[in-house]
Image: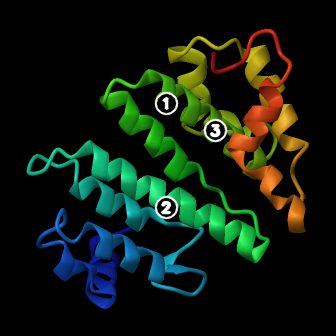
Amino acid sequence: MDQTQVTKILNDSGIGVLLRDPIGNFSEIIKKLKENTGENKLIDIHHPEFWNTIAFQFIDTTYKNYSLAEKVWQHLYDFEVDYQLTNNKPIHKGMAIHNIGWINRFTGNLDLTLRFTVMGLIEDALHRNGDEYKEGRAYPVLKEEFDIPEPLLQELVTFSRTFKGFIGEEMYRQLPENILLEFDHGKKENIIH
């Protein structure tokens, strides 16, 4: 997303004015993000990078507010889940999930980092073909930094892909947290424990 696109969204959505006091206007910023995100809206639901632009406003040297940045990504994730379930259309929610894991790494919460990175791998498995999931951000972090054995990661990918194509009332089963719970259920060694 180039600066021209960012400026257009900031101006057309009214978010630009609200960023003069991003902490005081946080709730209104989130409201405007949600109002302007979707198909055929200022912010494409399939490419919500603009949400990153807003989240990073809270991480910069002026604010250093990791909590609000995480809340932006959590709101994005919740919005994407609601959109997916309401419209019965799968949405790749990996950016929000990955960034929630990433920000928790900076705050020292490695348990949440691991959980959200695993959920990111599940999203990549659901929305990428073949071994393309290995090109995402989650796979190398889980393999190299959390030392999760490749066969276990491949087992999770294979299991996750059995949930592709669920529609209607079954769509909720495609949510990465639900897939992770089903994958871990009954195993002696859970992937995130």
Disc 2 is placed on an element classified as helix
Q: Point out residue 125 in the picture as x, y percentages from the top left corner.
A: 75, 42
Residue picked out by circle 3: 119
Q: Residues within 10 Å of mark 3 (few under 14, many from 20)?
A: many
Q: Nearer the viewer, residue 21 or 149?
A: 21
Q: Is residue 21 left or right of residue 180?
A: left
* Position above or below: 164 against 150: below
Q: Quadrant of the C terminus?
A: top right
Q: Point out residue 116 in the picture as x, y percentages from the top left corner.
A: 55, 36
* Position above or below: 122 against 41: above
Q: Residue at x 47, y 53 (%)?
A: 74
Q: Point out residue 76 in the picture as x, y percentages from the top left corner.
A: 49, 61
Q: CA distance from mark 2 to mark 3?
A: 15 Å
> Quadrant location of residue 52?
bottom left
Q: Give the amino acid at mark 3.
A: Met
Q: Residue at x 75, y 10 (%)?
A: 189
Residue picked out by circle 1: 112
Q: Point out residue 17 in the picture as x, y percentages from the top left corner.
A: 17, 82
* Position above or below: 167 against 121: below
Q: Give the amino acid at mark 2.
A: Leu
> Quadrant location of residue 158?
top right
Residue picked out by circle 2: 76
Q: Tell me which label, 2 or 3, sits earlier in the chain.
A: 2
Disc 1 is placed on an element classified as helix
Instruction: Count the numbered circles shown.
Output: 3
Q: Is residue 66 left or right of residue 34?
A: left
Q: Give the amino acid at mark 1.
A: Leu
Q: Is residue 182 left or right of residue 128?
A: right
Q: Residue at x 83, y 16 (%)?
A: 187
Q: Is residue 167 left or right of residue 1?
A: right
